[in-house]
Amino acid sequence: MPATIADPVAFWRRLHKLSNRIGADEQGKILGAIHVRIPMVTIDELRTLQRENSEADEKFWAGLQGMNAELAEEHKEVAAKAARLAADAESERQTPLREPPLLKILRRHRPERVRGEAALAFGASWHDAP
């Protein structure tokens, strides 16, 4: 895999963090020997890396902004649906109660079976129970 500008930057940063473990005269010799094999990053390379990172950050935040916009629209749709369902429930609440069809059939064909709690389970009141 080809090395990117970020690789030597990370290498040299890590190497400089270890520099407090050796003396100053030896540090210069060691860093010079390493520089021969792995060149230090130039200012232009650092600026290029910063530009690439900025562009990647911009792309990331633009994508996140787009996802949030989509999520907001979806939430608006859910809210509109919830409002419609609430309005439907409210209109159903205001309609007069009707006798459930099963209770009506039971009353007509087997009135002796519709008593007490069974009648209440089908929506009848205590007054309807024999």
Image (tube, helix red, strand yellow):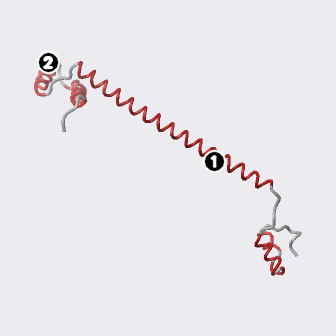
Mark 2 lies on a secondary structure that is helix
Q: Which residue is mark 2?
A: 25
> Which quadrant of the figure has residue 121?
bottom right
> Which quadrant of the figure has residue 104?
bottom right
Which residue is painted at 17% across and 21% down in the image?
23
Front-most of 53 and 71?
71
Q: Is residue 99 above or below residue 84?
A: below
Q: Position of 90 compared to 31: left or right?
A: right
Which residue is painted at 86% across and 68% down in the image?
126
Which residue is painted at 68% across and 48% down in the image?
84
Residue 88 x %, y %: 72, 52
Which residue is painted at 26% across and 22% down in the image?
46
Q: Which mark is residue 81?
A: 1
Q: Quadrant of the N terminus?
A: top left
Front-most of 52 and 25?
52
User: Going from the N terminus, do you reach mark 1 or mark 2 first?
Assistant: 2
Q: Residues within 10 Å of mark 2 (few under 14, many from 20)?
A: few
Q: Amino acid at mark 2?
A: Asp
Q: Residues within 10 Å of mark 1 (few under 14, many from 20)?
A: few
Q: Amino acid at mark 1?
A: Lys
Residue 97 x %, y %: 81, 61
Residue 73 x %, y %: 55, 40
Q: Is residue 27 above or below residue 106?
A: above
Q: Position of 121 compared to 31: left or right?
A: right
